[in-house]
Amino acid sequence: MDIEFYIKALKSKLEKQLPGIEAQKRMAPTHRINPEYEPNPENAVQSAVLVLIFPYKSGLGTVLMERTADTSVHSKQISLPGGKAEDDDLMPEHTALRETWEEIGVKPEAVEVLGKLSSLFIPVSNFTVIPVVGFLKQMPVFELNAKEVELVLVEELDEIINSAGTAEVFAGKFGVCTVPVYLVGGKTVWGATAMILAEFFTLHLQIKASY
C-alpha cells in the first residue's frame, strides 16, 4: 500500500465520526460490557496514549511496551506509550508526545500528529485515556526509561490483527478470566490497550478495503 495514500486517508477518517464504543467492545473483557462500561466521570484522571505508526517490514508497524514491575494496577502490563496529563499539557496531544518521549525516547518534533481516537474510561485506575495517532517516516531508535519500561514490542499492524484470539488472564477482583487478546512478541495484549487498538484497526481495515 502507498504510505502517502494511507496517511491522508487515515487523517481524513480521524476527522470524521469514529467507530467508537462499538469497535472498542470487540476486544473488551466480558466484565467491561455492563452499565459501568461507558461512564466518564468528571473526577477521572486525564491521560493520553500514542498509537505510533511507521514503515516496518513490508507494511506499517506500531510499538507497544511492557511496563516495569511496580505496585500499580498496571504493573507488567503491555500498553501503548503514554500516561497521566500534567498541568502544563495544553492538549492530549502534548501529553501523549511528552510521555512517549520520556518512556521510549521518541522526540515529539519527529511525530506527525494525525488525530485522535475515542476516549476510554478505565474503571480500575479511574483514568480517562485519549488515544492520539501519530506517524513517523521511519522506524524510530528507541531509548527506554528503565524505571518505567521493561521492553518495547514492534510488530506490523496486520500481524497484530491476525493474532486476535482469547486467553486467560488475571483481572484483579474478577479473578482469572478468558478475555479477547492480541499477541505481540509472545506477549498478551488485553484490556484498555486492546480496546484502543480495536478501534484503530477498524479504520485501518477500512482504508485497506478502499485502496
Image (cartoon, helix red, strand yellow):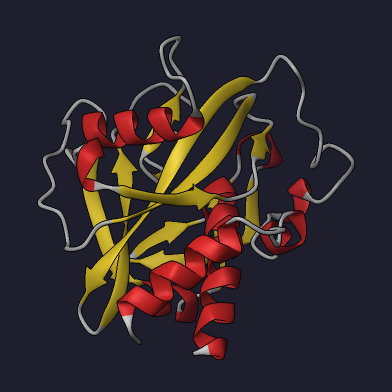
* Spot occupied by residue 19 in the image (x, y as percentages of width and height): 70, 62
Between 131 and 35, the one lying in front of the other is: 131
Residue at left offset 67%, top offset 35%? 121
Residue at left offset 77%, top offset 23%? 41
* Spot occupied by residue 177 in the image (x, y as percentages of width and height): 65, 54
Task: Reply above or below: 67 against 52.
Answer: above
Q: Is residue 112 left or right of residue 169?
A: left
- Residue that extends furthest to the right in the rendered view of this protein: 35
* Spot occupied by residue 104 in the image (x, y as percentages of width and height): 21, 40
Residue at left offset 75%, top offset 47%? 32
Name the image quarter holding the N terminus. Answer: bottom left
Between 134 and 155, the one lying in front of the other is: 134
Indicate the quadrant where residue 185 lies: bottom left
* Spot occupied by residue 90 in the image (x, y as percentages of width and height): 47, 20
Between 50 and 160, the one lying in front of the other is: 50
Task: Reply above or below: 59 against 20.
Answer: below
Q: Is residue 5 left or right of residue 178?
A: left
Indicate the quadrant where residue 130 lies: top right
Q: Is there any visible trace of residue 24 in the rendered image?
A: yes
Q: Is there any visible trace of residue 75 in the rendered image?
A: no
Between 30 and 113, the one lying in front of the other is: 113
Q: Is residue 188 left or right of residue 17?
A: left
Residue at left offset 17%, top offset 31%? 145
